[in-house]
Image (cartoon, rainbow, N blue to C red):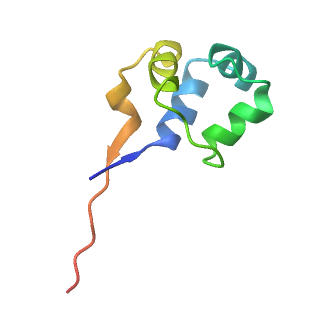
Amino acid sequence: MKEFDLLFIKERRKEMGKTLQDMADSLDLKNASTYMKYENGEYFFRAVHLPLLAEQLECEVGNFFAKNFAKTAK
């Protein structure tokens, strides 16, 4: 199973030198504070956001998903 990787998004945004406001503008959100709530997991990114995020972060949508290995009982 794969899990949405918010840490990747945050780190990639910082690598690219993008501000919270830059990202908010690209997703047509009210302000940086609103975008921060998405990036911190308080709100969920919508499917329509993913291609826009990928474009801004110069990556593939698939990069937003990390493998989540289920723990097995011993």
- Residue at image x 71%, y 23%? 29
Percent from the top left, x then y, of residue 58? 44, 14
Residue at x 75%, y 34% (from the top left corner): 34
Q: At 22% across and 76% down in the image, what residue appears?
A: 72
The residue depicted at 68 percent of the width and 17 percent of the height is 28
Give the camera-side residue of 21 and 34: 34
Position of residue 9 relative to residue 67, above or below, is above
- Residue 74 point in image, percent of width and height: 20, 86
Total numbered labels placed on residues in the image: 0
In the image, 18: left or right of 2? right
Residue 67: x and y in percent read: 29, 49
Residue farthest toward the bottom in the current orientation of the protein:
74
Task: Estimate the x, y position of residue 44 in percent, counting from the top left.
Answer: 57, 42
> Is 21 left, or right, of 68 in this rendering?
right
Position above or below: 45 against 53: below
Q: In screen coordinates, is 35 left or right of 6?
A: right
Quarter of the image holding residue 23?
A: top right
